[in-house]
Structure formats: structure tokens, C-alpha cells
Image: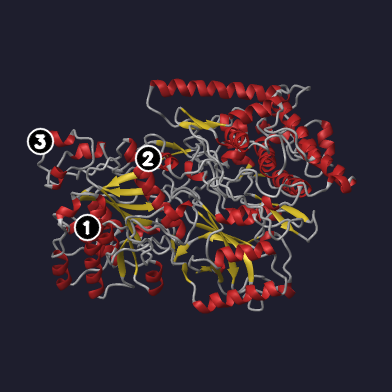
């Protein structure tokens, strides 16, 4: 499939005459896009070579690196916040995430390929050439640059408008002192120095100055500038970050590449040996060695690393606050600048260029950018501002539903958070071709209920496209790169109902199955307790697929993944409640049991041969079927990271393991090179149960917030860097191996019985002979990797299938007693008889009859849940009580507003004045490296 973003650009840039003499002629001769390599069915293919790559052999099946504790995938569940002193540490980790996915490109190439505007008239060219900057304002403190830059930017914008080349005019605003007050949370404190926004009435209202001038003269004068405004992440089209040339926090080297081919490296040795970014001498036009510029591109000083994390944070906020494919950014350091183009695969960074004494390159960039279309600037044109009359229609629907009592308190609150805030309301168009019919899911079409305008007889798909309205996201990724999952409560304009929309950027791999196909397979195999998809497809602008391009320019020597990411949109027909909304232990146990047993996870594996691979607190949802306690159904959602059985046996198609860090099995965290099995998913259910108990039920740590937070941190968040990847789960591993729990003295007798039973099952699993042999082999692999790492440059670790004597989890579904307890339905050994590839005969010899690996199948864990449920229902008047505490006993430091409001819903026993939302901030610990995960995100994204 051709790269629509690159192939759509067929003409040279519209650069003002003589402003940038070195920009080449139309075409892309210097760096043509790499050819598409068809999948041949072989494990390895030769990657195409560009001037930014070296050839290598890439293992398409095994992937390249084990999972890491990805900082951006941890915000919402982290105990330790990122405010104050922790902010610098957070930005350093975010910068680490960007390692090897920031690539440098000559500024002329970047402009010629990706910043193309309309050709200015001769008169406009002459006026553009007259725009100048005052060098004195760029050799002093950073804040003195803002006003001069805004004047400069506005001059270019005015000429763009004068030439009649704009869809709408862009204006420059100094936002360096005024955060975005509309988004809440820690994001409200993030403020780029300069923002370029559309000149529209609504944007102008949002961007009024939000900070009062201080008493001193300098600050008073600065605050009164006409360019002063508040940050607006939803409206900013382009942001500019400024640094003083003497700053210790320059994100990159700012030595310009030599433009004089006759200049020798030795001729500029004095400059090339300097490690810092820029100096006043460099503003006078010195031309250091190009090789020195290449070597010093990504400075490794502490301040530089932190500053790159800041840029990543800004890119993330732009791309998750707006319907974006990609975005641009400018970084200024004294008299020099770099242009960045971000997408979900990384960032292309231009070489540094001087722009004060010779502003031609900057003027060219700004003129071209301001005359490009919204699509060329990186916007998703399938999402547009919703018209007022449609918003009014949606609000009227909500009012009527509430008055009639047909909208639950939970859904009313979700609607309010999504649609009745300062966030803009967008209209999303889903093409008819992406809609999923009932027939595709293996269900009979109800002809009576089929749309009257259906174009096909017996079809339940309408003739027109699906139209949704969305507002503030329900959940958001904390990274500008990777899957970048964003979830929305959406309003279906035609069906007059609330649905759930999820945008993500999965890898474009021939081995990857789309979630649309996964859901179809699950439904056709009669797997229940899962969401019903109504649409799923790759997002396009016209006929151009949304696909990343940064990966084409990565250096692949050290195993960097060079596959593109594509934009995928899934719509499901209901908005479910989170697991935290379970009213008592009985509902919690019912919901988890539903998610595990034959209706969902178990049946998905035994019937469809699909393993979920991301069991987490965020992916186990609650569907209420009535007002009474216990009228709940557990729903397992988000199958985006699932694996089919044959994929598990062959190895991973991803460059990393996936799954939410806190809930991943101890084995996967200790040994990231391990292949995933059913046992890992089942153990994740246990960790979800433990986490929920720690938060919502009385136990031995309930009286001490410090002890509880430390236990929670040490059990779920800690990690350490081993060689070139992260390992964790140290306390988890010991709990599993010794049959212990992260708490004691549970007040809930049913939960106490369940957790003790599960702990014994996990202990027997970890102490089985085959599990011990597995651990021994994994330890040996770790030792070998350490030796290799210490003796040579880091190489991509190889994922080794160590289960040659019985990798198939179905071979070890428990004892005969366990198999009988499952009632024969969906028996995990069914269909596996005589499967030579599983090596079952050899594997059985490894099993210790006194300690079977009881998590290899569902039967033992299902039996534990079933036993507790039966006992609770038999003794319902004493066992089923509202035993959940009124408010969470710990609160993740950066919990989203959505989750806070979810928890604030009152239990039936609460008075109107009570609230389940803690009013105190969680205490944090210092000196401990922590990580966690947000809804729908993973510790190393696929």
C-alpha cells in the first residue's frame, strides 16, 4: 500500500524567490520513499535502504526488543506524581522513550517534501524579503524573544492574508506565561512560549490574557503586550519553544550544518569540538563541521534530555487535543532554530539554521505553512467542527432522556464531561464501507428493525455514512508516539444513542489482524460478554490512508522498528461502566468471573483460539442489567493487542511484548523475552483483583496511607533497567512463588476465601517442575544477554521459544478434576489431540504430579471463583453486603478527571453529602523509580 502522505506531494515547495536559494527543484530525488516490500511468507526480509538507513535483516516474526517500562503509558495509575521536582524526572523518561525515533534531515529537504504552500506573487515575494528581526532580542534572556517573534510571525501572516492564499488567517500569541485553563489536570500547567492559532471569534475569546501583570515594571510592560494570551491546546496549529543561546537545557545541538562545500572539518576544529548548543559567536555566522553537527545532534546532557522530554510532552498534547495525523513545531535557541515534524512514529528534526541575520529559511517555512491546507498541516479532515444546530439537537436529546429517566446517572455524567465542557465539539464521519452488519458477526438480521433506507435487502446497514459527535476524550494516551489510543463517548446522530469511539495507531504489519476482524471472529464463534462493534476501519482523507512517515528515516542498525503506523477507528455500541463502579465484593467477583469464564476469555481461547494479552483494570467493564445489587455483567473489551494461537507459537509480530505494566504477570515482567501464554493472562486477572481490593476494601494496610502507598508502589510500579530493557515485578514474583498476598486481614470473608484459594493456585503453578525449568532457561538467557551487552554494542534481543516440549497451554488445563469441573464445555484440550507442533508428549514428562502448573488452563481459577459465588449466593443474607469503602484508599497521582468523577458516584447507602472521591492528594515517595499505565495504554506500545 503506497504511503499517501509522501506520494501525494508531487510538486516542489512554493518558496518566495531568492529567500532560500538552496531548496531543490520539484521532486524528491535526494531521498525517494523506500519501495514497498511485499510479504512473502518468510520470516525475514531485507529492509529497503535510504540515505538515512543502513541495510539489515529484520526478523518480521520475532520482533526486535522486549518490553520496557514506557513512561508515557503510566501516568494515570502512578502513585508518584509529575509535579514539582518529579516533572524533570518525568521529562527525562519521556525523552528516553523518544530514543532512536528522532531523526535529522536537511532543512531544505524537510521544506521541499513536507512544508509546501502556495506560490506567492512577485509583490508578496518582495515584501517577504523585507521582513527582519532584531538580533539584540535574541542574544539575551528567553522572554525577550517572545514579542519580537510574534511581530515577525504576524508580519508573515498578514502577507499571506494579503495574497489571498488562506483558508483562514493564523495569528501569533505569546502564551509562555498563561496555561490552558480549559483542560484541567496537570496538563493545565503546560504552556508553549508561542502559539499560532486560527483568527476566529471563538479562538480569540479563548486566547484572552489569563495572567495579571506583576507589580514590577518589566513584568507589567511585558504583560500588556497585545500578543499576550492563554494557551489553547485544542486551537493551536503550531507551537514554538524558545531557549536562550546560553541555556543549559537546549534539546539539540544548534550548530548549523556547513553550507560551504569547500569548508573542511579541520578549518572549523575550534567550533566542532564545542559540545554546547550555540554561542554568540555562532550568531556571527561561523560554520562548524557537518560531522560535528551529526555527532552532537542529540545532546546527552541532563538538561538536553529533559528538554526533549518537554518537546515530546507538547507534541502529545497537540495531537491528543485535536484531530491530528501529525503536527509541526519550531524550537528556537538564540539566533538559531530547528523545525520538527511529529507523527506517531517519531519526529523528523531539521538541521539547525540561522534565522535572525538571514530570516529567509524561517520566512519560507512560515509562509508555506500558513498557506497550506488543514490536511497538509496534519489535521484529520474526517473530523470537523460540529455545526451549532447539531449540537443543540444532541443537547435536546440528552435533556429528554434525563427527564424520562432513560439515561443512567453514570451515562449522564459521562455525557456532561464529554459534551458540556470547554472542549470543542467535533463531527466525525464514518464511511458506510466501514460499518459492520449483523450478518458479519454471525447474527440474524432483524428485518423489522433494519433501517428503512438500507440499500441492501435484509441488511441492517443504512445507506448513508455514520455521523458522530465527540467532545472531551474519556481516555487519552500520554505519548505522542506508539498506539496513541484515545477513547470518546460519542453521540450517534442517526441512532440517537451514546456509543464508544476509539482511535489508535497500530503497526501496519502483514501479520497483524485488525480489531474489526478479531471481533468478527469472536462473534462468529459465539463468544459473549464482549463489546459489539458497529464500525471499524482504517481512517483516510479521501483515498489517502493516514500513515506515519518518520519510520522511513530511522537508523535500523540497533534493531529499530521501521514499520509504519496506520490510523484505525473502532466504534462499539455501548458505553460501559468501569470496574471501580462495582458496589460490593459480590459484584466484583461476578464481573471478574464473567470476564474469565466460558462467556468471554475462556471461550475466546478455546473456541476462537484468541488470547487477549492485555488483561487490566481498564479492560474489564461493567454492564448493569437492573438497579439491584448483583444485576451486573462483566464485559471484556479492547482486543487490539490480542494474539491468535498460531501467532503465539511462532513468536511475536510486535517489536515488544504488550500489556499494562501493573497487571502483567510476574514472569513477563521478570523475563520480557518470554513468549506469552494463557497463564500470563490468567495471572493478570489475579493482579486486577488484588489492585481493586487494595483500593476499595478494608485490609491490614487500610489504616496507614504511607504503608499502603509504599506497598502499592513496590508491588506494581517499581522497575529497573536490565541491559537495554526494563524488568520489574520483583515483589509480584515472590507473592506468586510463595503463595502470599500483598495484604492481610481482609474484612470481606468472600474476598478472603477467593484470594487465598487463588494464591495457592498461583503457588502450585510457579512451583511446578515445568515452570521451574522454564525459569531456569529464562535466567540463562538473561545471563547470556548481560555478557553480550558488556562485551559489545547493544543488539536486538532474540525472542526464544523455550516451550518446545509443550508450549500449548491447552495441554495443561489442570488435573482431571479441573477438567471435569469445567463441565466439558469449551474444553481447552479439544481439538488439540495429536497436535505434533505442541510437543505435548514430551511436555507431560516434565509435570510434577504433586504440583501441576495450574494456570496453564482456565479450570482451576474458574473453580475458585465458582466456589465463592455459590457460597455467597447460598448465604446471601450474610455474605452479600455493601462491604466496599466509601472512597478509594489510594488515588493515582495523575488520575484523569473522568475517573475521579466515576468514583464520586454515590452508593445507595450514601447520603447526598457524601462523596467517594478523595479530597486529599496521594502522598508520594521519593527516590523510587515508578511507572504505571493509563486506560488502554501499554508498557511498550504495539
- In which quarter of the view is residue 227 placed? bottom left
Distance between the alpha carbons at the discs numbered 1 and 2 = 27 Å
User: Looking at the image, which is closer to me, 644 or 148?
Assistant: 148
Task: Say which mark, if any, is on residue 100.
Answer: 2
- Residue at 61 percent across and 77 percent down: it is 396
- Above or below 298: residue 354: below
Q: Position of residue 293 (x, y in %)?
A: 22, 40
Q: Residue beneath label 1, please?
A: 362
- Helix, strand or loop status at disc 1: helix
The quadrant where residue 747 appears:
top right
Measure the alpha-carbon separation of dots 1 and 3: 28 Å
- The reply to whether residue 647 is visible in this rendering is yes
Q: Residue 67's spot in the image, x, y percent?
A: 51, 36
Estimate the spatial distance between the alpha carbons at disc 2 and disc 3, rounded to whole Å.
31 Å
* Residue at point 50%, 34% (across, down): 66
Q: Residue furthest front?
A: 215
What residue would you read off at disc 3?
267
**Nearer the N terminus, badge 1 or badge 2?**
2
Please provide percent x and percent y for residue 626.
Answer: 78, 61
Q: Quadrant of the N terminus?
A: bottom left
Q: Earlier in the sequence, mark 2 or mark 3?
A: 2
Amino acid at each position: 500500500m503506497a504511503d499517501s502522505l509522501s506520494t501525494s506531494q508531487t510538486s516542489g515547495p512554493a518558496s518566495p524567490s531568492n529567500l532560500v536559494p538552496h531548496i531543490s527543484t520539484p521532486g524528491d530525488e535526494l531521498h525517494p520513499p523506500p519501495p514497498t516490500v511485499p510479504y512473502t511468507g518468510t520470516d525475514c526480509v531485507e529492509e529497503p535502504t535510504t540515505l538515512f538507513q543502513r541495510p539489515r535483516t529484520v526478523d518480521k516474526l520475532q520482533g526486535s526488543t522486549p518490553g520496557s517500562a514506557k513512561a508515557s503509558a503510566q501516568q494515570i495509575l502512578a502513585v508518584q506524581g509529575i509535579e514539582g521536582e518529579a516533572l524533570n524526572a518525568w521529562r527525562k523518561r519521556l525523552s528516553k522513550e523518544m530514543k532512536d525515533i528522532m531523526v535529522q534531515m536537511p532543512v531544505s529537504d524537510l521544506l521541499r517534501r513536507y512544508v509546501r504552500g502556495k506560490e506567492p506573487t512577485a509583490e508578496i515575494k518582495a515584501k517577504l524579503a523585507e521582513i527582519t528581526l532584531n538580533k539584540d532580542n535574541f542574544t539575551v534572556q528567553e522572554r525577550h524573544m517572545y514579542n519580537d517573534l510574534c511581530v515577525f510571525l504576524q508580519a508573515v501572516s498578514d502577507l499571506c492574508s494579503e495574497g489571498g492564499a488562506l483558508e483562514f488567517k493564523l495569528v501569533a500569541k505569546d502564551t509562555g506565561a498563561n496555561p490552558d485553563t480549559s483542560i484541567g489536570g496537570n496538563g493545565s500547567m503546560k504552556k508553549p512560549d508561542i502559539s499560532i492559532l486560527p483568527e476566529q471569534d471563538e479562538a480569540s475569546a479563548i486566547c484572552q490574557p489569563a495572567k495579571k501583570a506583576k507589580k514590577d515594571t518589566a513584568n507589567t510592560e511585558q504583560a500588556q503586550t497585545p500578543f499576550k494570551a492563554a494557551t489553547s491546546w485544542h486551537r493551536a496549529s503550531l507551537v514554538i519553544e524558545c531557549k536562550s543561546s546560553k541555556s543549559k537545557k537546549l534539546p539539540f545541538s544548534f550548530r548549523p550544518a556547513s553550507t560551504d562545500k569547500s569548508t573542511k572539518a579541520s578549518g572549523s576544529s575550534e567550533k566542532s569540538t564545542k559540545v554546547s548548543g550555540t554561542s554568540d559567536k555562532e550568531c556571527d555566522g561561523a560554520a562548524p563541521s557537518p560531522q560535528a553537527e551529526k555527532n552532537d545532534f542529540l545532546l546527552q546532557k541532563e538538561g538536553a534530555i529533559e528538554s526533549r522530554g518537554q518537546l515530546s510532552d507538547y507534541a502529545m498534547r497537540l495531537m491528543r487535543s485535536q484531530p491530528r495525523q501529525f503536527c509541526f513545531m519550531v524550537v528556537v535557541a538564540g539566533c538559531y532554530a530547528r523545525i520538527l515534524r511529529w507523527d506517531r512514529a517519531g519526529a523528523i528534526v531539521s538541521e539547525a539554521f540561522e534565522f535572525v541575520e538571514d530570516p529567509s529559511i524561517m520566512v519560507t517555512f512560515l509562509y508555506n505553512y500558513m498557506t497550506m491546507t488543514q490536511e497538509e498541516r496534519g489535521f484529520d479532515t474526517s473530523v470537523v467542527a460540529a455545526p451549532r444546530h447539531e449540537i443543540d439537537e444532541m443537547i435536546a436529546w440528552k435533556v429528554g432522556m434525563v427527564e424520562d429517566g432513560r439515561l443512567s446517572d453514570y451515562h449522564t455524567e459521562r455525557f456532561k464531561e464529554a459534551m458540556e465542557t470547554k472542549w470543542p465539539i467535533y463531527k466525525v464521519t464514518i464511511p458506510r464501507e466501514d460499518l459492520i452488519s449483523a450478518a458479519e458477526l454471525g447474527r440474524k438480521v432483524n428485518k423489522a428493525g433494519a433501517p428503512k433506507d438500507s440499500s441492501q435487502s435484509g441488511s441492517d446497514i443504512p445507506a448513508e455514512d455514520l455521523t458522530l459527535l465527540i467532545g472531551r476524550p474519556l481516555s487519552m494516551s500520554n505519548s505522542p508516539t506508539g498506539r496513541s489510543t484515545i477513547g470518546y463517548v460519542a453521540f450517534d446522530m442517526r441512532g440517537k444513542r451514546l456509543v464508544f469511539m476509539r482511535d489508535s495507531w497500530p503497526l501496519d504489519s502483514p501479520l497483524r489482524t485488525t480489531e474489526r476482524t478479531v471481533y468478527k471472529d469472536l462473534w462468529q464463534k459465539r463468544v459473549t460478554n464482549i463489546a459489539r462493534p458497529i464500525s471499524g476501519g482504517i481512517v483516510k482523507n479521501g483515498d489517502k490512508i493516514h500513515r506515519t512517515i518518520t519510520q522511513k528515516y530511522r537508523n535500523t542498525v540497533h534493531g529499530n522498528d521501521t514499520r509504519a503506523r496506520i490510523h484505525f477507528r473502532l466504534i462499539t455500541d455501548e458505553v460501559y461502566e468501569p470496574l471501580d463502579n462495582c458496589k460490593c465484593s459480590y459484584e466484583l467477583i461476578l464481573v471478574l468471573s464473567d470476564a474469565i469464564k466460558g462467556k468471554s476469555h475462556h471461550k475466546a481461547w478455546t473456541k476462537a483460539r484468541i488470547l487477549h494479552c492485555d488483561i487490566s483494570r481498564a479492560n474489564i467493564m461493567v454492564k448493569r442489567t437492573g438497579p439491584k445489587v448483583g444485576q451486573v455483567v462483566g464485559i471484556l473489551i479492547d482486543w487490539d493487542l490480542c494474539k491468535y494461537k498460531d501467532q503465539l507459537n511462532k513468536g511475536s509480530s510486535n517489536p515488544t511484548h504488550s500489556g499494562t505494566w501493573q497487571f502483567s504477570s510476574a514472569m513477563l515482567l521478570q523475563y520480557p523475552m518470554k513468549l506469552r501464554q494463557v497463564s500470563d493472562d490468567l495471572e493478570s486477572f489475579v493482579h486486577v483483583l488484588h489492585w481493586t481490593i487494595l483500593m476499595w476494601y478494608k485490609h491490614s494496610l487500610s489504616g496507614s496511607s504511607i504503608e499502603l502507598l509504599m506497598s502499592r508502589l513496590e508491588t506494581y510500579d517499581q522497575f529497573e533497567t536490565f541491559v537495554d530493557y526494563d524488568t520489574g515485578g520483583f515483589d509480584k514474583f515472590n507473592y506468586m512463588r510463595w503463595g502470599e498476598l500483598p495484604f492481610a486481614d481482609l474484612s470481606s470473608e468472600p474476598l478472603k476465601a477467593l484470594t487465598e484459594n487463588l494464591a495457592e493456585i498461583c503457588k502450585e503453578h510457579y512451583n511446578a517442575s515445568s515452570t521451574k525449568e522454564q525459569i531456569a532457561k529464562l535466567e540463562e538467557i538473561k545471563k547470556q544477554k548481560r555478557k553480550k551487552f558488556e562485551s559489545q554494542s547493544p543488539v536486538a534481543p532474540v525472542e526464544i521459544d523455550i516451550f518446545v516440549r509443550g508450549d500449548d497451554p491447552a495441554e495443561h488445563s489442570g488435573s482431571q478434576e479441573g477438567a471435569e469441573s469445567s463441565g466439558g464445555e469449551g474444553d481447552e484440550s479439544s481439538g488439540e489431540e495429536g497436535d505434533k507442533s505442541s510437543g505435548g508428549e514430551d511436555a507431560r514428562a516434565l509435570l510434577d504430579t504433586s504440583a501441576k502448573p495450574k494456570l496453564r488452563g482456565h479450570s482451576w481459577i474458574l473453580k475458585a471463583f465458582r466456589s465463592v459465588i455459590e457460597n455467597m449466593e447460598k448465604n446471601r443474607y450474610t455474605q452479600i453486603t455493601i462491604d466496599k469503602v466509601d472512597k478509594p484508599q489510594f488515588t493515582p497521582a495523575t488520575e484523569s478527571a473522568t475517573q475521579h468523577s466515576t468514583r464520586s458516584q454515590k452508593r445507595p447507602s450514601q447520603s447526598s453529602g457524601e462523596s467517594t472521591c478523595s479530597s486529599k492528594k496521594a502522598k508520594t515517595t521519593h527516590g523510587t523509580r515508578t511507572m504505571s499505565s493509563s486506560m488502554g495504554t501499554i508498557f511498550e506500545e504495539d
